[in-house]
Image: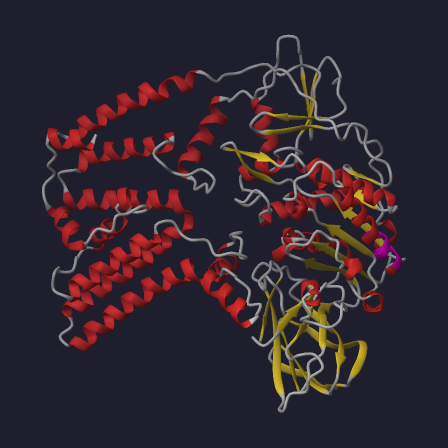
Amino acid sequence: MKPYKTLTLLLVFLVFFFGPSWFVTGPVKIAPGVILQMPDLPGLKQLISEQITLSEDADTIQYDQDTLLLTPEKPAHDSLIIDTGVQLIVLPETGSPAVSFLDSILSSGEQIRILYYGDSQLEGDRITDWLREKFRSFKGGSGPGLLSPTMLVPYTRTAYVRSSPNWIRFNWLSYRNSDIQHPDLGPLLHVSRFLPAGELSEKETEAWIRVSPSSFADSAAARYERLRLFYGNLTDSLKIIITADNRIVREDILIPVAGVAEYQTYLGDAGSVSIQLKGRSSPDIYGFSLESDSGIIIDNIPSRGSAGLEFSLLGNDNLNELYRLLDPDLIILHYGLNIVLNIRDDYSFYEEGLVHQLERLKKLNPDADILVIGVTDMARFENGEVQSYPNIPLIRNAQRRAAGRAGLYFWDSWEAMGGYDGIIAWRDSVPALAASDYTHLSYEGGHQLASMLMDAMLYDPYGSTYQEHVGSEQIAPVDEIVVYDTEDGGIKRFIAGLIEFNPDQQFIFTTISFWIFIFLLLAGYSILFNKPFFRNSYLFLLSLFFYYKSGGLFFFLLIVSTITDYLTGLLIYNSKRKFFKRFFVFISLLVNLGMLAYFKYASFVTEAVNNLLNLNIPDIDWLACFSNSFFGTSFDVSMIILPVGISFFTFQTISYTIDVYRGKSEPVTNILDFGFYVSFFPQLVAGPIVRASEFIPQLYTPFRLSRREWGHAL
């Protein structure tokens, strides 16, 4: 049976099953008198303005910047969130937008310090790097601010922190578990040590910290003018050597101290800095800051797994002294992600705990403003669909009330993102503003939220002082709302969906994009099937595309494995001595099993070692760090993602080199043919493993498919 006949039958199948779905959607009415205020997502305003249609009794659309007003009536509800597939938000009038609580500190000529606390949403500096750069554009300042020797994510958008492996991190849980004997953990909510507390080693021990700018750091953040080191509980003198740009700028001795001490030195606009400590005892390192004497300093202080309730658990005198040294002008608290998972109907316990934290922070920092940021939107899979957590408004309201009771400022980031399903709209935007976990923001999303926050600081569109907005807890239904897919916008998004990789939309045979892929593949195959070279090359390229759609940028691992085993196969076959044959087999095993071990077992081994030896080695995806640094991607570096099908294609290429080594197969001379063997898409992501001796000879035989075989295949 010729391929074009298969193509014809497939076309009939597609028309029969998917054709009716093209006719069930169309323009429907949007109820008149609704104010639609859209989030500032890239390209969304233009997209919506092109796609909205009116019902017959709505005579005009007024489009002015952020607002679409459908006349003739005002909306009947104070607050509406309209779910249309593209997020449209209807918000109440917020009253005066002129609340500018930063005026007093922005008018100062001295250093302005902002301590930005939060949970894992802050990791990687994804929000604060934008704020730092924008505030400095009119206020000046340099450096990344407070850092730690034991950062959970050592590579951020601003700086790369490396430290010797003998550093140990202690937080509140360490104190509760008696791993550390005091709760004096400082403003970073943890301390770092390289020797046990209260002990003198028999010989001097060395520890080091090195900081360099990341490739994304702006020119101001990449300049290190002054180093400030905060430490305490040092029982013996300690030698310190400060190196800036590979030149020693200072050698000194830290004297024993029981409480809190600060050591500082000027670096002279350095581009990198190294701190070397050597002695028989280790102090508690509360953190170190790379900063300037004037301008804006923004400290990024993420605490993974925190709900923002640890401040009252810390040593009061220790925290008071360190805040006195830092002298913050504004403290921002941005928590809530970890409370969302605790689903309940009442969050008064959280409100009370938060009030206690806020009142304590006010007492410790009487001259600083404090801003509470509400929880951002989160979503989960529920009944086969992605939906926002329904308890988020309750948590947001608890945070708002806590801020009001403490007399502090509050900013509603959930409402600013779009309320219910806002995180879904952010994830679906181009570029994606949220990560695939529907919890964390991407770097672009962090910048978007930071932009909204900066506007809120200066103009307060979603903020409040002590008053709550009327109707903020009500989400009213709307009867007739649909977005009309214009031909231009709809086709563009449809084509983009076929081409782009979307980790949240699996490329499987139950999706129409997969069947379109098969249709196009067979269309080309029906032309090329009698020309082996072009046929194999064509199928190789489409198999790579299939893997890209299934696994994203991990397809480059497929390329690495292909090139490695293609070359080692040739080298094994042409080597005269057995030593070299075995050596090239070893290279193949090292590359393939090395990739497999890293992606599949590195996290498991790290966790096992940490549990066995009571260590705190971070589980970091260094490959993602590299990609973020050099290619501008925004991968989550806090976990190692397993590439789809990696076990199958690594063992398949290994079987090829083993067959060549044992003389069961001759090497493939055309790398495109070999690439097709490795990437053949029907068994690439789910197996089975096919030996080269069975597959490769079929690449050079004429096409043959009997009706009986076709029937079995169907």
Instruction: Give the residue at x 72% y 68%.
Output: 289
Closer to the camera, 471 or 367?
471
Among the 4 quarters of the image, the one containing residue 536 = top left
Choose between 586 and 104: the one closer to the eye. 586
Residue sitting farthest toward the front:
177
**Residue 347 location, x and y as percent?**
74, 41
Please check the rendered image and state whether residue 359 is part of the magenta-colored stretch, yes or no.
yes
The residue lying toward the viewer, choosing from 682 and 574, is: 682
Quadrant of the image containing the N terminus: top left
| Residue 59 is a magenta residue | no
Report the predominant secondary structure element of the magenta stretch: helix
The quadrant of the picture occupied by the C terminus is top left
Residue 315: image location, x then y, percent: 80, 66
- Can residue 65 be spotted in the picture? no
Compared across the picture, whether 97 is left or right of 607 comes to right
Q: Is residue 57 above or below residue 105?
A: above
> Which stretch is magenta?
358-363
Q: Is residue 690 above or below residue 94?
A: below
Left or right of residue 586, residue 118 in this image: right
* Left or right of 397, for residue 690: left
Q: How many marks?
A: 0
Residue 217 percent location from the top left of the image: 61, 60
The x, y position of residue 496, in whole percent, is 44, 35
